[in-house]
Image (tube, rainbow, N blue to C red):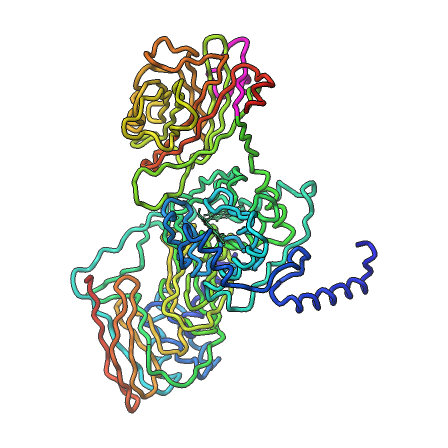
Amino acid sequence: MTWCSPPALRQAIVLRTAMLSLMAWSAFARPAFAERPAPDVAAGRAEYVRSCARCHGVEGAGDGIDAKRFYPRPRDFRLGIYKFRSTASGTAPTDEDLFRTVTHGLPGSNMPDWPHLDESIRWHLVEYLKSLAPIFQEAPAEPMAVAADPGKPHADLAKGRALYEKLGCAACHGPTGRANGSSAGGLVDDWGMPIRPANLAQGWNYRGGSDAESVMRRFLSGIDGAGMPSYAGTISPEDAWHLAYYVVSLQEPPRWNRIARATRVRGELPKAIDHPAWHQAERTDVRLRSVVTTAGEWAKAPTVTQVAFQVLYDEETLAIKLAWDDPTENTQGPADALAVVFKPAGLAGDVVTLQAWPHEGSSALDLWHWSAATKRAGETLSPNFDVITAGGQAAGIERSSAARYADGRWQVVLQRPLASPDLEGGAVLNPDELPTLAFAIWDGSHASERAVSPWIDVALRPLKPVQHAQE
Amino acid sequence: MNTQRVASIALMAIVTGIGCGGGRAQDAAARTEDAEQQAANVQLAETPETPVKAIRPAAASAATGGASLQGIVHWSGTAPTREKISMDADPVCQQQHAQAAYKEDVIVNNATLGNVLVYLKEGVSGSYSAPSTPVVLNQAGCMYKPHVAGIRVNQPLQIVNSDSTLHNINAKPTANRPFNVAQPVQGMKTDKTFTKPEVMVKFKCNVHPWMNAYLGVLEHPFFAVTGEDGSFTIAGVPDGTYVLEAWHEVYGAKTQNVTVSGGRVSPVEFTFSAQ
């Protein structure tokens, strides 16, 4: 608005203020909310019972029938403690904060997004949520003031990094954000449940938004209930942007390819982790879900949530490199471990996912496994994962492997023959088909849990356009 | 950061009217707000190790009329052993403890129980304006000092980080507004107040899960925290009949009636046990 001379600006502010007082509900005037309907708690309640109660409970106590399965657990709305706010620590969120959560959901958690609900219904839901906790009877909290965004090109990442260290983010989030800080393991949320700091490399897993402004709001406001404190007053408004952009720079954009493409290698197939051949290989990221093996208990905080893999091959052999974040290196007792699982030919669709496997009478699967206890890999057919959880005494045939743990991340390279003449009934990988595999990963410090991926196809030959269309 | 200054501020707060654990006089001066008296107290408390003993009886009787309500909290049964704290997670914390650090939740000495907040729960009439001197909650050696204390409604609470490591202060009141703020830098101070009475407000540090403290927020000056010898003194209690409560973080609360008449009151005893 270049025409805005100071008096005009002042006039605009006066006008805005007048508008504000007209719109009794709103903390700040935004045209998008001009349509906001008159509060209707009953309509909100009706939609709540329909859409939200199964997780958040009929009375909002966070105890719906599905609640136990989820980490983090669904919010108990009666307490008035909200994580994703633009307001000071210990205060209520603004209506807009709630509207944003309902609309966009909380990515990386089980809280779905609800953009398909009418905007007016979403506002009614906000009113209903507010009727559940006394904190909303107080004067509405204002969003915390922030400085103007300098824009990414002007962000000083070196300064941001220094602030990250100075402010002690690393105590929880780890030196490079991989959720492996010295205090990460002992965190308990305000509801008494163990909680993990976010892995800052996984932007997709930020619930409140992975952009710089959202990140800044998180550390200025704190994440109430989660134990992450507010840093308001400990950092200047300008520096807050440098820190926020630094955190954004830690994010490693994921490549959720639907089909993983392998690269054919001429010359030696790499056995080592740092072999330059890996630079030519496409990386595919896969999200992992935790399977809690003790029934009836609250879901625990998962530690392994994503795996990246690359595949190289020649006429005879397949090499795979995997990388996953695990905040602790466990090489004894229950140790960190991995299984690459081949989907048996003829097993249609997703009938059996690793989430449901093993089950009663489940067929044997080909497990290509590696354990941090033995630092060795093997391959065997098994109807369950016992060979791995029992310490992975290189069951079956031995396979070559290399592994490294550094700063909260495992990197493992495995090799196996395409056809496996040495393993009776083992998977035969035909380059003209799309072999299908999945991953199961164990964090030794969470022995009762395993993280598993869905099935994913690997294209060994360059994909023909026809195949794309079928996809 | 000047730790000495923090220490002396902390000392001043101890002396001038807060319950910081240690059988000391509570803010008897609250109603009179006698600045000179406060200054005198600060000087009395010159030896940091024993500030409490030095001031206890004098401050209580000098500042106010009313009775000095004295008592002791007994422990019955085998003395529980104090639990060692492992500070492995943060070398900055570990380095500050040449000897092992112990939890401060259960302090039993000679069959007495320390760190018990004793306060008049019912029967206090009249209103008492809050002192402007802050209660200091210091984080030193990755422990809260004091571990149990009383504070007045609207009395400033100054939270100080004397450690060169990140602390966060996660206060979880229910009647008052909760907060969770970071103090990443040594010497940082944060000021807060509680506007409603509440026994107790729990404080914890998420970075160092062994750290916690309890603050009782009261509308009047009639409270004390038992010291390592289980004793307490509440000064200047006016004539009346009261319910006196003794609150302990592990063993719960006990109450009894006390009557002050003609400025006199008999000594009070509480007994806690593991059951």
Q: Is residue B9 visible?
A: no
Query: At 37% from the left edge and 61% from the top edge, which residue is drawn?
Result: B213
Question: In which quadrant is the N terminus of chain A drawn?
Answer: bottom right
Q: Nearer the viewer, residue B71 or A345?
A: A345
Q: Main secondary structure of the magenta part?
A: loop
Location of residue B163 with respect to B109 vertically, above or below: above
Q: Which residues are magenta?
A: A259-278
Query: At 45% from the left edge and 84% from the top edge, which residue is drawn?
Result: B32
Question: In which quadrant is the C terminus of chain A drawn?
Answer: top right
Percent across and percent down for residue A357 are 34, 30
Q: Is residue B113 visible?
A: yes
Percent across and percent down for residue B176 are 45, 68
Location of residue A92 with respect to B128 vertically, above or below: above
State left or right for residue B69 relative to residue A172: left
Q: Nearer the viewer, residue A322 or B56?
A: A322
Query: At 51% from the left edge and 63% from the top edge, which residue is drawn?
Result: A41
